[in-house]
């Protein structure tokens, strides 16, 4: 068996960043150290194309589970660090092969140190030849029972038998900050995950309509934000906005068909103001094209017309089954389906317009002083910072 003493991390997309590469690696280093802050004995080493965690006796299992939640990691492997000496490498690979219960194997070598006297293919052939001579294992390059991976560096070589997929993407926070419109539903937490995966620091805004929405609905949203905050450098700020006055005014002025359209137009106006105040460069939503009346292309155009800030919609081309599958995988689904309704479902119109006209929406809005109501809602908004739940319950 391999004597794992190091975790070797591969960067993935970070390798394409050119002159900015060092900034991405520095941010990844910060996020890894935060995620593993409870394990004081670990040592961290940054390299140009690899990142190393020296275990120093730490059980690797909980460390690996944490690493699966760090964006910017393509994959990682439990590894044994040995001297970059062909005889040492060969001897340890033979021991690993002898200890395995597999009947077939494959060598996968990579020579990072070009001064090493043997190329990658030569290492494969040499080590495999010794294993074939001294064990009953056979080579199977397509479906091996055992993979022995060898990475040769200048001073050290890393021996591995498993490649564990990482979360991929870019380190959370490297690409700026976005304000996510967070409901209590299934979609927006998944959108938060996707935005973080592209390197964004996510803040959230939630629109509540007390007394029509309950404290349980508010807590549900905060619980979802807390669950996602572990991917977001350990915290997430949530701006809670009282939307009741605006919502009642909308229904009085416009009635059923245009109500949802006007609600969304007011929400994005509020979101833009909050985003600008908090240095967010864009708004994020969990919208999927055509899923509901406010998500048709005509509705999106009508709603977007009232703001100038970019709107990011990472789920726009995903169907509901895909979104639910992703919610289950990241662990938010069971919380999202708790039966506490948000402001949109409480005032759900029977016949919402699917092809709203901007001029008509503007005519309805001219019937009430929404600017004053927006100012009041912003002045009374509450900002709450949440952190990951103590008990791990996802991924």
Image (cartoon, rainbow, N blue to C red):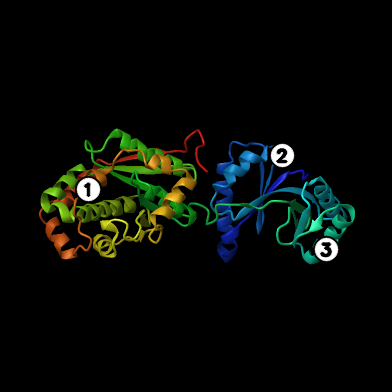
**Residue 153, visible in the rendered structure:** no
The structure residue drawn at horizontal position 29% and vertical position 41%, both measured from the top left corner, is: 341
The structure residue drawn at horizontal position 35% and vertical position 36%, both measured from the top left corner, is: 219
Instruction: Of the two numbered discs 3 and 1 on the same chain, state the one appearing first in sequence.
Output: 3
Instruction: Of the two numbered discs 2 and 1 on the same chain, state the one appearing first in sequence.
Output: 2
Q: CA distance from mark 3 to mark 1?
A: 67 Å
The residue lying toward the viewer, choosing from 125 and 280, is 125
The residue lying toward the viewer, choosing from 36 and 262, is 262
Q: Locate residue 315 relative to residue 31 in the image: left or right.
A: left
The residue lying toward the viewer, choosing from 6 and 135, is 135
Q: Which residue is mark 2?
A: 56
Q: CA distance from mark 3 to mark 2?
A: 32 Å
At label 1, counting other C-alpha atoms closer than 10 Å, the crowd grade (few under 14, some 14-19, many 20 or more) is few
- In the rendered image, the vertical position of residue 74 relative to residue 69, given as above or below: below
Quadrant of image for the N terminus: top right
The residue lying toward the viewer, choosing from 289 and 217, is 289
Q: Locate residue 313 relative to residue 123 in the image: left or right.
A: left
Q: Nearer the viewer, mark 2 or mark 1?
A: 1
Q: Which residue is mark 3?
A: 125
Q: Locate residue 12 relative to residue 283 in the image: left or right.
A: right
At label 2, counting other C-alpha atoms closer than 10 Å, the crowd grade (few under 14, some 14-19, many 20 or more) is some
> Residue 77, percent across and down?
67, 50
At label 3, counting other C-alpha atoms closer than 10 Å, the crowd grade (few under 14, some 14-19, many 20 or more) is few
Q: Which residue is mark 1?
A: 348
> Residue 359, percent across and down?
15, 65
Task: Give the image quarter of residue 24.
Answer: bottom right
Q: Locate residue 300 relative to residue 175 in the image: left or right.
A: left
The structure residue drawn at horizontal position 45% and vertical position 44%, both measured from the top left corner, is: 228
Instruction: Of the two numbered discs 3 and 2 on the same chain, state the one appearing first in sequence.
Output: 2
**Residue 1, visible in the rendered structure:** yes
SS under mark 2: loop
SS under mark 3: helix
């Amino acid at each position: 068996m391999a004597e794992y003493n190091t975790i070797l991390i591969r960067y993935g997309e970070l390798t394409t960043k050119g002159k900015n590469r060092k900034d991405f690696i520095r941010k990844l280093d910060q996020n890894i150290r935060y995620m593993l802050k409870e394990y004081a004995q670990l040592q961290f080493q940054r390299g140009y194309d690899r990142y190393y965690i020296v275990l120093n006796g730490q059980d690797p299992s909980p460390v690996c589970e944490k690493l699966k939640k760090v964006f910017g990691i393509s994959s990682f492997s439990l590894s044994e660090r040995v001297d970059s000496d062909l005889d040492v490498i060969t001897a340890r690979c033979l021991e690993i092969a002898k200890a395995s219960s597999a009947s077939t194997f494959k060598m996968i070598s990579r020579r990072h140190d070009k001064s090493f006297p043997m190329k990658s293919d030569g290492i494969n052939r040499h080590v495999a030849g010794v294993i074939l001579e001294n064990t009953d294992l056979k080579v199977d390059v397509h479906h091996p029972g055992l993979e022995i991976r060898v990475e040769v560096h200048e001073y050290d070589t890393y021996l591995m038998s498993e490649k564990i997929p990482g979360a991929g993407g870019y380190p959370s926070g490297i690409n700026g900050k976005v304000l996510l419109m967070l409901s209590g539903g299934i979609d927006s937490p998944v959108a938060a995950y996707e935005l973080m995966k592209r390197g964004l620091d996510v803040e959230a805004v939630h629109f509540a309509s007390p007394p029509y929405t309950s404290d349980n609905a508010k807590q549900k949203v905060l619980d979802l934000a807390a669950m996602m905050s572990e991917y977001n450098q350990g915290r997430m700020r949530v701006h809670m906005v009282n939307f009741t006055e605006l919502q009642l005014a909308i229904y009085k002025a416009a009635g059923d068909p245009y109500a949802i359209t006007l609600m969304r137009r007011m929400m994005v106006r509020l979101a833009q103001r909050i985003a600008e105040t908090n240095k967010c460069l864009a708004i994020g939503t969990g919208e999927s094209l055509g899923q509901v009346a406010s998500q048709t292309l005509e509705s999106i155009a009508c709603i977007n017309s009232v703001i100038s800030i970019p709107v990011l919609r990472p789920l726009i081309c995903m169907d509901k089954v895909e979104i639910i599958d992703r919610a289950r995988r990241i662990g938010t689904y069971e919380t999202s389906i708790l039966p506490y309704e948000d402001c949109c479902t409480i005032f759900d119109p029977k016949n919402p317009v699917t092809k709203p006209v901007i001029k008509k929406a503007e005519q309805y809005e001219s019937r009430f002083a929404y600017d004053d109501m927006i100012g009041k809602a912003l002045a009374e908004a509450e900002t709450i910072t949440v952190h990951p739940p103590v008990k791990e319950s996802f991924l």
